[in-house]
Image (spheres, coloured by chain):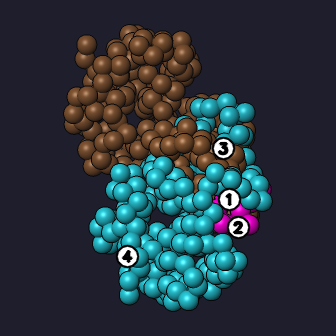
Chain colours: A brown, B cyan
Amino acid sequence: MPEFSSKLLNAAVDAFAKLPGIGRKTALRLALYLLKQSQEEVERFGHAFISLRSEVKYCTECHTISDTDRCPICASPRRDHTIVCVVETVRDVLSIENTQQYNGVYHVLGGIISPMDGIGPHDLAIDSLVARVATGTVKEVVLALSTTMEGETTCFYLYKKLHNFPLSVTTIARGVGFGDELEYTDELTLGRSIKNRQPFTV
Amino acid sequence: MPEFSSKLLNAAVDAFAKLPGIGRKTALRLALYLLKQSQEEVERFGHAFISLRSEVKYCTECHTISDTDRCPICASPRRDHTIVCVVETVRDVLSIENTQQYNGVYHVLGGIISPMDGIGPHDLAIDSLVARVATGTVKEVVLALSTTMEGETTCFYLYKKLHNFPLSVTTIARGVGFGDELEYTDELTLGRSIKNRQPFTV
């Protein structure tokens, strides 16, 4: 699609088109949609992202996105702090919370071991997981990673790091088909698979 | 999907989810994507829309989006100013320009007559079209509106307003299937239909 007559419009379309899964045609539609909204509305829109990016905090315990130092889950006395569910991203925390099948706490790795993308164990929040476990309060670590090759590799790495501690290392039940991404799994399957979690075997 | 642990994240997801065609799951993905970008990048993103909305200008002649008082098309001596192509939105100007089959100028109505949506002739840039025609320089008005019921109604209304002037009123060739929206038409069909435009008949 060629350049538009307006540089401002071009800049807005470029901004939208940089987002994953948004092509230039959709980007143009969204930009023109915003043009029809009130000035105030568009400012609220733009600033929502700017403040998210500049003011965002991560829970010091589990590394999920939080407005406070400790996220509501880590701060809750109703949650079982002896079970820690290890996930790849913040999105996975939300997915598992949506199933309403899990009452423990979380640990967000911030990614997955993937040599192809240049992501090694030291790029992930693994040391802080080991530190949490070393306090002795954790009785179970649930590995809830995608059932891809990278997920399996990460599970294996974490198991090696954790199996000497007096706790059980489990994985979510393989109700999820091999090769599937966790985030695309429906709530029922995901809920069942976290309930039927099984001891991790090498 | 329930509320997230972070109000900032919530606000960003809400902002994205208000856009047409973006659900909350996609909105969350986009918000988390932005979180991974640099602060500077996200500020550029947010401000692209804010400045588009606050600084946008419309061409005084054809009402398309423009950075200048007269858009590059209206200001160009290479374009044929005796032919005016009437379209619904700015997007349609871009679509027709992409076909590279048209060398006249445009007139953006800013909508289409649609009693169901409460849009009447007075909400559209019809008076300014009549004023352009009344200067006597226009020899042909091409009606390039969607071939929907509303589009046909608008064509008929415009024809009644224009047919007493010494010019020909044409419509783009009906290569476009009845009931189709203009913006979804492929470039080939759209290009052919603007080339084979025909006299408007009641």
Report if residue A114 is visible in the image. yes
Q: Which percent across, then down, holds residue A195?
A: 29, 40
Question: In which quadrant of the rendered image does the N terminus of chain B lie?
Answer: bottom left
Answer yes or no: are tags 1 and 3 on the same subunit: no
Is disc 2 surrounded by few (<14), some (14 to 19) or many (20+) residues within 10 Å? some
Is disc 3 surrounded by few (<14), some (14 to 19) or many (20+) residues within 10 Å? many
**Looking at the image, do the residues carrying marks 2 and 1 touch, with CB atoms under 8 Å apart?**
yes
Q: Disc 1 or disc 3, which is closer to the eye?
A: 1
Please tell me whether residue B81 is drawn above or below residue A106 in the rendered image: below
Please tell me whether residue B90 is drawn above or below residue B201 in the rendered image: above
Residue labelled with disc 2: B61
Number of marks drawn: 4
Q: Label 3 is placed on what type of residue?
A: Ala
Chain bearing mark 2: B
Residue labelled with disc 1: B74
Q: Label 4 is placed on what type of residue?
A: Thr
**Quick check: is A162 in the magenta stretch?**
no
Q: Which percent across, then down, holds residue A94?
A: 46, 44
Q: Which percent across, then down, holds residue A64?
A: 56, 36
Please tell me whether residue B190 is drawn above or below residue A172 in the rendered image: below
Q: Earlier in the sequence, mark 2 or mark 1?
A: 2
Chain bearing mark 3: A
Answer yes or no: are tags 2 and 4 on the same subunit: yes
Spatial distance from mark 4 to mark 3, Cα to Cα?
A: 32 Å
Spatial distance from mark 1 to mark 3, Cα to Cα?
A: 22 Å
Spatial distance from mark 1 to mark 4, Cα to Cα?
A: 28 Å
Q: Residue A11: which numbered mark, if any?
A: 3
Q: Earlier in the sequence, mark 1 or mark 4?
A: 1
Q: Disc 3 or disc 2, which is closer to the eye?
A: 2
Q: Residue at x 70, y 67 (%)?
A: B61
**Looking at the image, do the residues carrying marks 4 and 3 touch, with CB atoms under 8 Å apart?**
no
